[in-house]
Amino acid sequence: MEKTLRNCIGGEWVSSSSTESLEITNPATGESLGRVPLSSARDVDAAVAAARAAFPKWRETPPVVRARHLFKLKNLLEANFEEIAATVTRENGKTLDESRGSVRRGIENVEHACGIPTLMMGKSLEDIAAGIDCETFRQPLGVFAAITPFNFPAMVPMWFWPYAIATGNTFVLKPSEQVPFSPTRLVELAQEAGIPPGVLNLVHGAKDAVNAILSHRDIAGVSFVGSSAVAKIVYEGAAKSGKRVQALGGAKNHIVVMPDADMDRAVSIVTESVFGCAGQRCLAGSVVVTPGKAYEPFRERFLSSAKALKLGNGLETGVTLGPVVTARAKERIIGCVDAGAKEGATLLLDGRSARVEKLPRGQFVGPTIFEGVTPEMSIGKEEIFGPVAGIARVGSLDEAIETVHRSGYANATSIFTTSGKAAREYRYRVGVSMIGVNIGVAAPMAFFPFGGTKGSFFGDLKAHGNDAIEFYTDKKVVISRWI
Ligand code: NAD
């Protein structure tokens, strides 16, 4: 019989109370990896109760001791690095190198959270009035939860719980039901690192589990990453029940390639940005905007660079483009390409019927490039989340910025140029939160905030960096007079 994953509640690995489950298959091979339970509100309730019970003691555990658990976890993550990366590839499809990169980025959050005794310090000022002193203390708030997406099975959960537990909160993680194996492994390692029972709980599931989290009165706050439609539901639902909420949504990222860019370098970086992780990255380039004379030299090189990608099983050396996550995702992406073709964009490279001969059950979409993409077209404004790029031709940097601003999303953007003036102007004027200058995937590291604006983000405090400390703590102010 296929293995059905268990939830981790109060340090015990227990079966979900739900009889519903989902089969998870390797998107490259079609091989079954096991089943994930679609947990119920009862399971969420049990996890929250365990987290609540663990809170008082964990909160009193000195930050330096909490940090030591994280140091131990960091060592365990390093020791199991290759295994975690391979698990990510098996369940998500991205190449092993891409998985390694993402696990590394995840671990950096654990490293950063190890600094919690300093990160969590408050402030103080003597004599705010004669003989009166004022101090602030940061205190944990109780139980937090995170709901995470399929595209970074190990990394995105690590954007949240290391900080939440380092600051003394307890936690319930509800990972994507499409990629449950990597998060399960991380929770096992957290247990091995000695993080006490109930501090970090894991509930597998989908919509029902999410709804139970949103309305649960004993959850103080919710971190979410996923599509904008669900981010909005989570933002509104969590706020309605009085919770803190940070909800990171979808993206439609524009890359501006100026005529003065180092074209060979730009093309190689843009190819990685657009097709890396099969385009299933919230920082993936989606529309390449080419002002003035940039268009011709870029188009030609970009096409040949995309054609050189090697489709296949991400576990195999030499493969540079893995499958998309599921058959459903493939169908949806092909639907987006069909729509683009109908709307009048020209298909320069069509990956809809791409196959990998020895992997007939793989969910492959080949690199796909449109030209003549405009902001009104669905492929110019909607998130595709697949290996599909559009090229848009504009007259100037001004027009490029205008094109970017017409998008309802504002997650990330990049500019490729050798002009400091153009780079400065772009950075200064463009209303997008994460910006790359000659960088294709502008991913802020653990010690900087991560998140967009407009339709890409709902909330105010972003993921990791100092924002995480702010999000997971209350600032208590004490004003004292002793003389
Ligand atoms: P998704 O929105 O479908 O799912 C995300 C989470 O929400 C999952 O845990 C899922 O179980 C849950 N969920 C799904 N539908 C729900 C519903 N109707 N009600 C309640 N919960 C629901 O997203 P996904 O397909 O897993 O991930 C891809 C999306 O995530 C893309 O839009 C991508 O841009 C976005 N993403 C954003 C960032 C960022 O930093 N902004 C990072 C990674 C991914």
Image: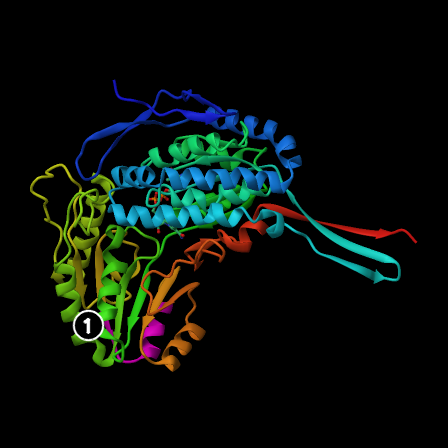
Q: Nearer the viewer, residue 69 or 378?
A: 69
Q: Position of residue 21 (x, y in %)?
A: 32, 25
Q: Which residue is mark 1?
A: 298
Q: Nearer the viewer, residue 347 or 422?
A: 422
Please indicate whether residue 75 sits to the left or right of residue 196 in the image. Answer: left
The overriding secondary structure of the stretch rendered in magenta is helix
Q: Is 166 drawn above or below residue 1 in the view shown? A: below
Q: Is 177 drawn above or below residue 413 in the view shown? A: above
Tell me the kind of residue under disc 1: Phe
Q: Which type of secondary structure does the marked residue at label 1 adopt? A: helix
Q: Is 234 drawn above or below residue 53 in the view shown? A: below
Q: Position of residue 390 (x, y in %)?
A: 22, 63
Please indicate whether residue 111 sits to the left or right of residue 365 in the image. Answer: right
Residue located farthest toward the right when viewing the structure as drawn: 483
**Residue 119 on the magenta segment:** no
**Residue 399 on the magenta segment:** yes
- Near mark 1 (Cα within 10 A), the count class, few <14, some 14-19 or many ≥20, is many
User: Which segment did they paint magenta?
Assistant: 392-405
